Structures are given as C-alpha cells and as structure tokens.
Image (spheres, grey):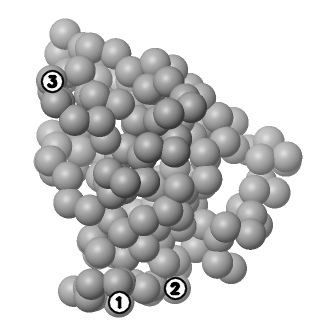
Amino acid sequence: MSGEVQHGFKRGSRELGCHTANLPDDELEPMTSTVKTGIYYGYAQVHPECPNGCASDLPNEDLRVWPMVMSIGWNPYYKNEKLTAEVHIIHQFKEDFYGHVMTVLVLGYIRPELDYTSKDALIEDIQTDIKVALRSLERPDYQSYRQDPSFRL
C-alpha cells in the first residue's frame, strides 16, 4: 500500500501514546477487499516527496525502512463509522510527516480488532502488538523484506 499521509483523528498520539499515520481512503480498497480487519505488521517507509507541499524536510534517518504495526478496521472502542488504515511506524520521528508519501509492506497478521472496556486495556494490547511485530520481524527471512523493490533505498 502506498499513499500520501493524511490527518486522522489524532487519538493515537494524544490518547494512546502511539503516533499513527493514516493512508488515504482510496488506498484501502485493494487490501480490505481481500483481508479481514485487524492488526497487521510489516515494514513502512516515508518518502521525501510531498505532492501537495509539506511543512518540513525529513532527515535521512527518518527516510529509512522501519518496522510497523497497522490497524485496519473500524476501531470499535471509538465507534468509528468509517474504515481506516492507521500505521504506527516503530521509530521516533523528529517531525510530523503529513503530506509525505508513505509505502507500507504488510507481512503478517497479529489479531482481530477488538472492542475494549477501557483505554488502558487498549493501550496494553497496542504495546503487546508492537512486541509481537518486532519479534516476528527479527526472523532472517522477514529481514530481507527491508530490501523490497517497493521501497526506495
């Protein structure tokens, strides 16, 4: 999946301590028509180009291929009325990258999306998802996907 990073609900960083980058709605159809909603992992890369202009240039470090966790779904805890793809790149970016093009390579499924009884339970599962993704991506065969032709190295 690839597209220009969009503004979302800003709940990830403000409420959950987990910054997310949203892909455009038109990028969801190819994936959501073939997979179930839930939490996935793989790799992501933010590119320097900004089709509609950006507020900042990103340092080279931020343009590398990084592990990611992605939620595709309705976010039942928040009662969303629209399907979203929210990507958490496991890297501390120096600045926001709204408007930049991002490529996401999905490699595996972690779990279905769930409705939570508390925000704390949701945050706990997000932290577990990150650990599962990082452990899975440690496998040598998965490491090779960092060199996938869809990324710009």
Element assignment for label 2: helix
- Specify few, some or many for label 3: CA neighbours under 10 Å numbering under 14, 14-19, or 20 or more: few
Distance from Cα at disc 1 to Cα at disc 3: 35 Å
Instruction: Tell me if residue 82 comes above or below residue 18 in the rendering.
Output: above
Q: Can residue 134 be seen in this view?
A: no
Element assignment for label 1: loop
Q: Residue at x 47, y 35 (%)?
A: 32
Instruction: Tell me if residue 23 comes above or below residue 71 in the rendering.
Output: below
Please state the horizontal and vertical placement of residue 129, each as a whole percent of the image. Answer: 48, 31
Instruction: Please name the residue that numbered disc 3 is placed on.
Output: 79
- Specify few, some or many for label 1: CA neighbours under 10 Å numbering under 14, 14-19, or 20 or more: some
Q: Which residue is drawn at 27% across and 84% down?
A: 52
Instruction: Please name the residue that numbered disc 1 is placed on.
Output: 57
Q: Quadrant of the C terminus?
A: bottom right
**N-term-proximal mark, 2 vs 3:** 2
Instruction: Locate residue 97: give its quadrant.
Output: bottom left
| Badge nearest the viewer, 1 or 3 | 3
Q: What residue type is labelled 2?
A: Asn
Distance from Cα at disc 1 to Cα at disc 2: 9 Å
Q: Which amino acid does label 3 sit on?
A: Lys
In the visual, does 138 lie left or right of 69?
right
Instruction: Please name the residue that numbered disc 2 is placed on.
Output: 60
Instruction: Locate residue 78: give its quadrant.
Output: top left
**N-term-proximal mark, 1 vs 3:** 1
Please state the horizontal and vertical placement of residue 107, each as a whole percent of the image. Answer: 66, 42
